[in-house]
Amino acid sequence: MGKKKGKESFRLSFQDWILGLTAMAVAGCGTAYFLRLVLRYTVTIHIFFLCFSVLIFLIIGGMLFWKKNEFNRDLSIFAIISVLIFFFVALLVPWQINSWNSRYYDREMRYLTEKHFTTQFFPEEIPGGISDYHFRFEPGILGLKSYATVGYTCPTQVLSDYRKDIRKNAIIGPMSLNSAREKKLGPTYRAQIAEICGVEMSELGNVGLTIAFPDNIDDHKDALVYVMSCDYKDGVVKTEVILVDITKDWVCFSKYY
């Protein structure tokens, strides 16, 4: 009788073990880092980075310890490079936020601050009893405009308190929505802006206000616009404004960067 052929075990080379364990270590560190970001902020792309790192960790681990004959060096190298790229992208590049949950407002503002997108007149906290909350942040990458807005419907008394502070601190306004949208401001508004920004009216020219309006602005055509701060640079008047629609108890804080 011939000898029975035993099932031959597949052995990885020392270099394969080093490469595979390195890929697992990088993916594991990426998983821990991206999990921290997901818990700390509300940036959707962090969830993608987290899922990718977990998947890579499981795939490389499976090839090392269960299906060694399927170990792929190119995949391991790709995994290491990809996770490292994602790490630096998450660390250095600001990303979009689009949130409808007011519980995450602290996280959203923390992200803006840590990415150096500061605001002066956004609320410190979101009051109770609100509805229709929407926070949006566009960091201005890939040709997009850079802005942040947060709007919601609030109790009448809350809106009344807001209006007292707004009237006290506004530098221009109230303006109607149509006036604020004009591409060329009238001489009175231009004179105010020139004085605030410390430039001559002749230098200011025929400009309009650059305001980041929320997506649902057409639902609030009676809103009044209060300019809280503005900055003139390269022919653009960038603003931080607060919009108030007293007919619907709605308020929106907006900053154009």
Image (cartoon, helix red, strand yellow):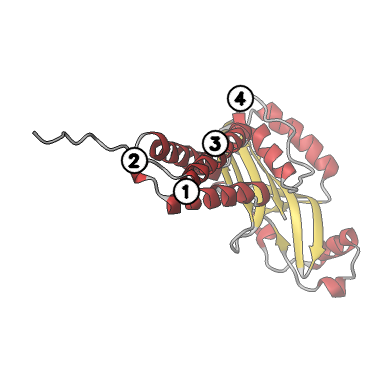
Question: Which residue sits at x=73%, y=40%?
Answer: 122
Q: Nearer the viewer, mark 4 or mark 3?
A: 3
Q: Amino acid at mark 2?
A: Phe
Q: Nearer the viewer, mark 1 or mark 2?
A: 2
Q: Secondary structure at mark 3?
A: helix
Q: Secondary structure at mark 1?
A: helix
Identify the residue position indicated by label 1 in the image. 76
Question: Which residue sits at x=80%, y=56%?
Answer: 230
User: 240 or 173: which is nearer to us?
Assistant: 240
- For residue 110, what is the image quadrant? top right
Q: CA gap, disc 1 to disc 2?
A: 18 Å
Q: CA gap, disc 2 to disc 4?
A: 64 Å
Identify the residue position indicated by label 3 in the image. 28
- For residue 188, what is the image quadrant? bottom right
- x then y, percent, for residue 169: 84, 43
Q: CA gap, disc 4 to disc 3?
A: 42 Å
Query: For mark 2, does the 10 Å Cα neighbourhood hold few (<14), some (14 to 19), or many (20 or more) residues?
Result: few
Residues at marks 1 and 4 touching, judged by CB atoms closer than 8 Å? no
Q: Amino acid at mark 3?
A: Gly
Query: For mark 1, does the 10 Å Cα neighbourhood hold few (<14), some (14 to 19), or many (20 or more) residues?
Result: many
Identify the residue position indicated by label 2 in the image. 10
* Residue closest to the far front: 1
Location of the C terminus by quadrant is: bottom right
- x then y, percent, for residue 75: 43, 51
Q: Is residue 63 left or right of residue 136?
A: left
Q: Is residue 188 left or right of residue 144?
A: right
Identify the residue position indicated by label 4 in the image. 129
